[in-house]
Amino acid sequence: MGKTIVSIVMGSDSDLEIMREAGKALEEFGIGYEMDVTSAHRSPDRTADFARKAAGRGIQVIIAGAGGAAHLAGVIAAHTTLPVIGVPIPSTSLQGMDSLLATVQMPAGIPVATVAIGKPGATNAGILAAQMIGLGDAAIAKKLEGHKEKLARGVEEKSRKLKGQ
């Protein structure tokens, strides 16, 4: 695994099962990452400090997962110029719709790239982080091309099976 350049944070350790999917996606591309817990509401000073210091530690992209009011990604984005990807966590009776809306509805000037709710979103957050990094890293860009080719081959295989070939 390469040097740690992506930080995956979550509002609670109960989000770990979902956020691990972002780590798995990053591992596929050989991208080093770290994971931690910080809360926009329960530890606002810790969260702001994390966001302000991330770039200085070599972090290039932050992936933030949170449920409920889901302000983590937005608070982090308010304190850094790094790209922030928000993963809505389905942690309440609203099945993640509250988290999705809280994450995606950022005011102009504080962007948060928001992906789907839950595990598919966490996977896509890892891939999106790799795409961002791949803009300046030819080796990662090449791995991303391989990933797309693998997806296409999978569809062809399923088509052949369905047609009985």
Image (tube, rainbow, N blue to C red):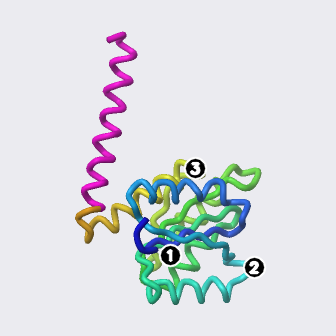
**Residue bearing the label numbered 2:** 42
Q: Earlier in the sequence, mark 3 or mark 1?
A: 1
Q: CA distance from mark 2 to mark 3?
A: 24 Å
Residue 97 location (% of width, % of height)? 64, 53
Q: CA distance from mark 1 to mark 2?
A: 22 Å
Question: From what the image shows, is residue 133 above or below residue 24?
Answer: below
Q: Are marks 3 and 1 in contact (CB under 8 Å)?
A: no
Q: Which residues are drawn in magenta?
A: 140-165
Q: Are marks 1 and 2 in contact (CB under 8 Å)?
A: no
> Residue at the location (75% across, 55% down)?
92
- Of 129 and 111, nearer the camera is 129
Q: Nearer the viewer, mark 3 or mark 1?
A: 3
- Residue 107, labelled with which disc? 1
Q: CA distance from mark 3 to mark 1?
A: 26 Å
Q: Where does the C terminus fall, quadrant-wise?
A: top left
Residue 89 as seen in the image, left or right of residue 62: right
Dot 2 lies on which element? loop
* Disc 1 residue crowd, few under 14, some 14–19, many 20+, Cα 10 Å: few
> Residue at the location (42% across, 74% down)?
3
**Residue bearing the label numbered 3:** 119
Residue 68 location (% of width, % of height)? 71, 62
Dot 3 lies on which element? helix
